Image (tube, grey):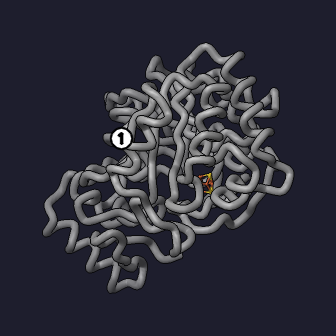
Amino acid sequence: MTAERKYLYGPVPSRRLGLSYGVDIVPLKICTLDCVYCQLGRSIRKTVERKEYVPVEPVLAELSEALTDGSEADFITIAGSGEPTLNSRLGELIDGIKHLTDIPVAILTNGTLLYRQDVRADCAKVDVALPSLDAGDEQTFKKIDRPHPTISIETVISGLCSFRQEFAGQIWLEVFFVDSINTGPEQIAKIKDAIRRIRPDKVQLNTAIRPTAESNVVKLDAGKLHDIAKQLGPECEVVADFSTEPSDEDALGLNCATRSKTQTLLSMLKRRPCSLCDLCTGLAISETEVLRHISELEQGGLISSERKGGKVFFKALS
Ligand code: SF4
């Protein structure tokens, strides 16, 4: 019987990366930021300390076992419940993954530690880096991302610029927009200037579709986000999940092969609030079956629901 996986999820469909395995190498909400829009709640520990939060060996053992069952994937994505570059053995992990498979490796990071040469060297081992940048000035950065006190917006932008110079792979920069925080003409102009300096291969725009750390966070509507995409330039695309498809991060919370559907569903909700439709698509099961699992988890006091933008989202209770 396959052992329950602790660090590896998937492979599951993902909006930005196709079919992807997710690798989780930092515990829940240990992060350099405490973004107001974070879908995992407030940061439990805001830190810039790099250390071995999760050992590399069991992660690679899980991946090795998963790959032997013949599952295919477009990417192995280093992501998870906290900021993955905080794991000091990130480079060893990527080397280990590359030793096991030819599947391209991606990393989802907030990019705040790329000012460090060791972090840039680790991240440069992946094929696609997906950092984020939500502001072009200090005031907006503090308001939307609530960084660790040692991190300034210039540290982040300069780190991304240095990484661009050293990294031959693809950089897909995500910008997350929250209405009335980083959506004014002045803020957009400063973000545009930062993008010009960073020179990413793609710019992907997102907004708060799902429940967020702070309840007063307001999402942009699709029209406004597309309008901002036009202002920011031709390399910009909207990746916000205005449809009913699951996003990357929702998808990476799945592990259908090894857990019971109820546990898989709970695992998915621990990573991200999801709609009924997300759960049906992600788990590839009917609404009736999803509702049966939801009812079981609700009765056990493990999940709750919340309405946002006319849609009901389910989330795990901590
Ligand atoms: S959104 Fe990402 S970077 Fe921001 S607090 Fe959450 S985990 Fe950290």
| Residue 13, above or below 197 | below
Task: Inspect this view and state whether residue 66 appears.
Answer: no
| Residue 5, above or below 77 | below
| Residue 243, above or below 20 | below
Residue at the image position 73 percent from the left and 27 percent from the top? 120
Image quarter where ligand 1 lies: bottom right
Determine which residue is flagged by label 1: 14
| Residue 150, above or below 316 | above
Residue 125 lies, in percent from the top left, at 63, 21
Depth check, front residue: 242 or 3: 242
Residue 94 lies, in percent from the top left, at 61, 27
Residue at the image position 80 percent from the left and 49 percent from the top? 48
Residue at the image position 63 percent from the left and 44 percent from the top? 110
How many numbered marks have been drawn onto this rendered protein structure? Answer: 1
> Relative to residue 118, is residue 286 drawn left or right?
left
Q: Quadrant of residue 13?
A: top left
Local SS, label 1? strand
Within 8 Å of ligand 1, the CB of disc 1?
no
Where does the C terminus fall, quadrant-wise?
bottom right
Q: Residue furthest top?
A: 168
Depth check, front residue: 37 or 298: 37
Residue 181 lies, in percent from the top left, at 59, 59
